[in-house]
Amino acid sequence: MLLLLLLLFVLLLLLLLLLLMFLLLFVLLLLLLLLLMLLLLFVLLVVVVVLFIFRFDSEPELHSRRIFEVEMMMGFVKKLLLLLLLLLLLLLFSSFLMLLF
């Protein structure tokens, strides 16, 4: 009877370990997806800024205003990227807390 109880306890621990491994895999896939979205946002930003600058290349009188607008856009995107990075760190921290408890 004691051996059966011990075997049941070991199986329960293995099941819990398997569940934690799947949870960690899910969190890692989520982090990978978030990183991929961040990379896509960065590529989109580069393409938009390059097209934005080259579109007004033929109008030199608008350069200073356009450069200011591009700098404002870059500042907004930097804030957005920092917010996404903070969200990523929060997600990572919460996953580690879930693994601890």
Image: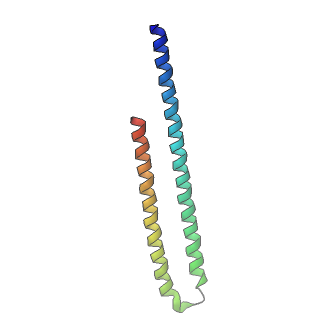
Q: Residue 71's spot in the image, x, y percent?
A: 46, 77
Q: Residue at x 51, y 32 (%)?
A: 19
Residue sitting at the far bottom: 61
Q: Foreground residue, 75 or 4? A: 4
Colour approach in the figure:
rainbow
Residue drawn at x 49%, y 17% is 8
Which of 39/95 is in front?
A: 95
Quadrant housing residue 80: bottom left
Going by the image, does 51 lie left or right of 13?
right
Residue 93, percent from left and from top: 40, 46
Residue 86 lies left or right of residue 29; in this view the side is left
Image quarter (top left, top right, bottom left or bottom right) of the C terminus: top left
Percent position of residue 87, x then y? 43, 55
Q: What residue sits 55% from the left and 74% below the top?
A: 49
Residue 15: x percent and y percent? 51, 26
Residue sitting farthest toward the front:
1
Give the camera-side residue of 5 and 14: 5
Name the residue at 55% across, 46% down: 29
Q: Is residue 9 above or below residue 50?
A: above
Vertical arrangement, residue 20 with respect to residue 51, above or below: above
